[in-house]
Image: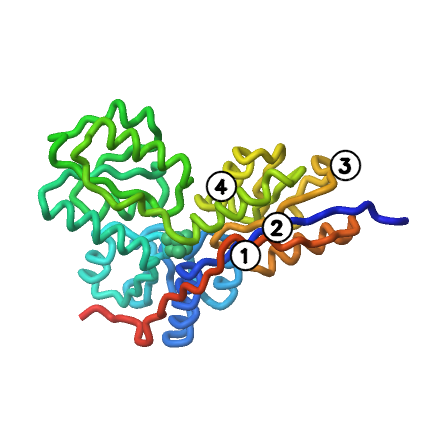
């Protein structure tokens, strides 16, 4: 039986970013250095495939420091942790390694600097996301106000409108954040912040690539996990850019083939924590059903690499 033709627009950049790559390498190095088990507080990156493969090598994933024995090393995830967590690990004399992405650490430093200068902080982010919890946790309780939407900006109550600064989560929608920053600057003209926002290069580039392909796609799939903020934003970006059907899939087995009946074009991308092997799996699944022509659409080239600490740090 001849297969129907399908144009598959493959977005680039897609998938792993430098922060995710570094965090995974840190867990692998820790396993090599100390042997199993090595504990990891929270999923090192939001991807089940990655977490399962590290678990197979001897990593144990827990949600709280209390779940880690004091005589085994613990690694903090790429999303960052509140200041109190490494402080508590040091108090317990635990060996710990911080795999926080350097671009998240940069936001932590920004928030701390503004606080030292006497400014009250506003964070644009998603409530409950580990990165938001980690960034807000750099300052004493109550010192960071969270806004998630333009509507929130209208209601936020600040100490002094003249003494304000803002930071953002790194994995937000670029377009939505522009609107929230504009609303903040409008209501609080003296607010201090980054030139645009703190959204990282990887989030920005993946959203730009999706915008480039979405209008040409009958449907678009984002390979990523439901708890991955940057992956979920890609689904929204595709819809806003005009793609009528945009869905998140963890891997090929999650694709709803009935929803794709009759399509002539498909877009494929992946969030920053999804490995390329899962994208290949998705493309192969399309090849099994259609006569696929892959068109790579590259909107940016990435050569960012973060150094992995050669010696994993042990607290004094
Ligand atoms: S998405 Fe951005 S901030 Fe998050 S780990 Fe990757 S590079 Fe770092």
Label whose residue precedes the other's in the sequence (2 or 3): 2
Residue pictured at 40% horizontal, 53% vertical:
201
Which quadrant of the structure image shows residue 187?
A: top left
Residue pictured at 44% horizontal, 44% vertical:
229
Calculate the distance from the C-alpha at mark 1 to the C-alpha at mark 2: 9 Å
Calculate the distance from the C-alpha at mark 1 to the C-alpha at mark 4: 17 Å
For disc 4, the marked residue is: 232
- Kindly state the secondary structure of the residue where label 3 is placed: loop
Contact flag, marks 1 and 2 (Cβ < 8 Å): yes
Calculate the distance from the C-alpha at mark 2 to the C-alpha at mark 4: 15 Å
- Kindly state the secondary structure of the residue where label 4 is placed: helix
* Ligand 1 has an atom within 8 Å of the beta carbon of the residue at disc 4: no
x and y percent of residue 217 in the render? 65, 40
For disc 2, the marked residue is: 251
Q: Nearer the viewer, mark 1 or mark 2?
A: 2
For disc 3, the marked residue is: 262
Mark 3 crowd level (few <14, some 14–19, many ≥20, 10 Å Cα)? few
Residue pictured at 40% horizontal, 62% vertical:
23
Q: Nearer the viewer, mark 2 or mark 3?
A: 3
Q: Nearer the viewer, mark 2 or mark 4?
A: 4
- Kindly state the secondary structure of the residue where label 1 is placed: helix
Q: Quadrant of ligand 1?
A: bottom left
Label whose residue precedes the other's in the sequence (4 or 3): 4
Residue pictured at 67% horizontal, 37% vertical:
218
For disc 1, the marked residue is: 49
């Amino acid at each position: 039986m001849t297969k129907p033709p399908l144009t598959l627009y493959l977005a680039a950049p897609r998938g792993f970013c430098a922060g995710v790559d570094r965090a995974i390498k840190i867990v692998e190095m820790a396993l090599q250095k100390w042997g199993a088990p090595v504990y990891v507080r929270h999923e090192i990156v939001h991807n089940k495939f990655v977490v399962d493969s590290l678990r197979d090598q001897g990593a144990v994933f827990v949600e709280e420091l209390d779940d880690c024995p004091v005589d085994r090393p613990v690694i903090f995830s790429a999303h960052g942790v509140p200041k109190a967590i490494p402080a508590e690990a040091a108090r317990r004399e635990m060996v710990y390694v911080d795999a926080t992405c350097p671009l998240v650490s940069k936001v932590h430093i920004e928030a701390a600097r503004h606080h030292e200068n006497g400014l009250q902080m506003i964070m644009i982010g998603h409530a409950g996301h580990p990165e938001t919890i980690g960034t807000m946790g750099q300052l004493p309780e109550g010192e960071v106000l969270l806004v998630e939407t333009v509507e929130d900006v209208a209601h936020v109550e600040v100490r002094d409108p003249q003494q304000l600064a803002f930071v953002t989560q790194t994995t937000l929608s670029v377009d939505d954040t522009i609107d929230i920053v504009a609303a903040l600057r409008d209501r609080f003209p003296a607010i201090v912040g980054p030139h645009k926002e703190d959204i990282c290069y990887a989030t920005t580039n993946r959203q730009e690539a999706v915008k480039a392909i979405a209008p040409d796609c009958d449907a678009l799939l984002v390979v990523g996990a439901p708890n991955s903020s940057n992956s979920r934003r890609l689904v929204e970006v595709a819809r806003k850019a005009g793609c009528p059907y945009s869905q998140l899939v963890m891997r090929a087995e999650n694709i709803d083939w009935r929803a794709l009946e009759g399509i002539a074009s498909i877009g494929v991308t992946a969030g920053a924590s999804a490995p390329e092997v899962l994208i290949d799996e998705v493309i192969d699944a399309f090849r099994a059903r259609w006569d696929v022509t892959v068109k790579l659409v590259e909107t940016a080239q990435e050569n960012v690499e973060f150094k992995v600490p050669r010696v994993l740090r042990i607290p004094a």
